[in-house]
């Protein structure tokens, strides 16, 4: 017995264990195949016809090729810039707007909150968005990949709900001591909101990192492609990666090159998530249910 409930029997536990093992295998098998294929040479690719689960000879030729200064290297730098700058801009706008909407003294707070909620229900549409970006002169600019998606109404609501959970007595005591709104926001509210900021920052960063559709709409210059658009072009559409695009003389096998690009596009998110995971449940649930 545990907490007044009978423990599951041996058959039930065995079935759950087998089901969990099968699910883990189905999830990990494709990912392991992608990683191992990226380290495969021409002989292994010829032997298996594509996906290589266990290369006989491991090689870094595919990674050397994509990091040698071609289209993939440029796209990686563009993606890092867009993700870093876009996340910082989005966090600044979302936290400031969330704090303003959480302030009970703000004039017109209800109307502003209504506009944010309406943005969750209605989108401007593809053609009006393109015309607006064009009128702003952002076509073929990296800012076209940041400005149209800088603000998320959902994230603003989550941040606002978390800010509402901060005791108002704490903020009022700071005001009595002479602190201004900017000092309160910077020195009190933000340090107390690390959990929700980590979650919202992860949402924004993953969104910027994985975005490719805006590149199709607003970017004509190949040197400004993001890594995800390169992934779509050369992996999803199965376009051949030439030696002139990776700046190497001896071109590695195409499956290894494609899987190497896929691994590079996945690894940054996998590296960042474990550091933010402990904040994820607390920030998401608290911001979603309070207020």
Image (cartoon, rainbow, N blue to C red):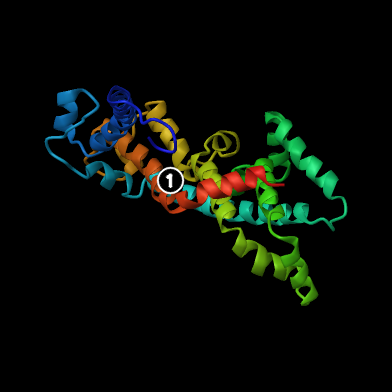
Image: 229 above or below 51: below
In the image, is 11 to the left or to the right of 195?
left
Q: Residue at x 64, y 43 (%)?
A: 288
Rendered-image quadrant of the N terminus: top left
Tell which residue pokes out farthest to the right in this image: 107
Residue 149 sits in quarter: top right
Tell which residue pokes out farthest to the left in this image: 56
Image: 18 above or below 133: above
Viewer-side residue, 211 vs 291 = 291
Estimate the x, y position of residue 174 in percent, counting from the top left: 74, 72
> Does any portion of residue 123 appear in the rendered image?
no
Estimate the x, y position of residue 58 in percent, counting from the top left: 16, 41
Estimate the x, y position of residue 108 in percent, counting from the top left: 87, 50
Q: Mark 1: give few (<14), some (14-19) or many (20+) Cα within 10 Å.
A: some
**Which residue in the structure is indicated by mark 1?**
269
Provide the secondary structure element on which disc 1 rests.
helix
Image: 185 above or below 60: below
Image: 247 above or below 4: below
In the image, is 43 to the left or to the right of 189?
left
Viewer-side residue, 284 vs 117 = 284
Q: Residue at x 32, y 48 (%)?
A: 67
> Does any portion of residue 182 appear in the rendered image?
yes
Viewer-side residue, 165 vs 210 = 165
Q: Residue at x 23, y 36 (%)?
A: 36
Estimate the x, y position of residue 13 in percent, counting from the top left: 31, 27
Q: Residue at x 29, y 33 (%)?
A: 34
């Amino acid at each position: 017995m545990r907490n007044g409930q009978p423990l599951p029997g041996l058959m039930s536990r065995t079935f759950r264990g087998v089901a969990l093992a099968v699910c883990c295998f189905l999830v990990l098998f494709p990912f392991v195949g992608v990683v191992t294929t990226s380290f495969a040479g021409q002989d292994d690719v010829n032997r298996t016809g594509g996906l290589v689960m266990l290369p006989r000879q491991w090689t870094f030729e595919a990674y050397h090729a994509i990091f040698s200064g071609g289209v993939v290297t440029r796209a990686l730098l563009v993606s890092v810039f867009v993700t870093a700058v876009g996340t910082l801009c989005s966090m600044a706008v979302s936290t400031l707007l969330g704090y303003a909407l959480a302030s009970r003294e703000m004039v017109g707070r209800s109307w502003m909150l209504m506009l944010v909620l309406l943005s969750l229900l209605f989108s401007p549409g593809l053609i009006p968005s393109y015309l607006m970006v064009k009128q702003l002169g952002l076509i073929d600019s990296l800012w076209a990949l940041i400005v149209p998606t800088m603000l998320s109404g959902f994230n603003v609501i989550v941040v606002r709900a978390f800010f509402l959970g901060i005791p108002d007595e704490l903020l009022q005591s700071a005001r009595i001591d002479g602190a201004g709104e900017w000092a309160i926001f910077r020195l009190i509210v933000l340090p107390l909101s690390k959990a929700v900021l980590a979650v919202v920052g992860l949402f924004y960063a993953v969104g910027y990192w994985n975005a490719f559709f805006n590149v199709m709409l607003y970017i004509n210059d190949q040197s400004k492609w993001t890594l995800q658009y390169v992934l779509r072009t050369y992996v999803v559409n199965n376009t051949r990666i030439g030696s002139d695009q990776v700046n190497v003389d001896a071109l590695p096998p195409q499956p290894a090159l494609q899987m190497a690009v896929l691994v590079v596009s996945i690894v940054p998110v996998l590296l960042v998530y474990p550091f933010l995971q402990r904040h994820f449940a607390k920030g998401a649930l608290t911001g979603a249910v309070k207020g």
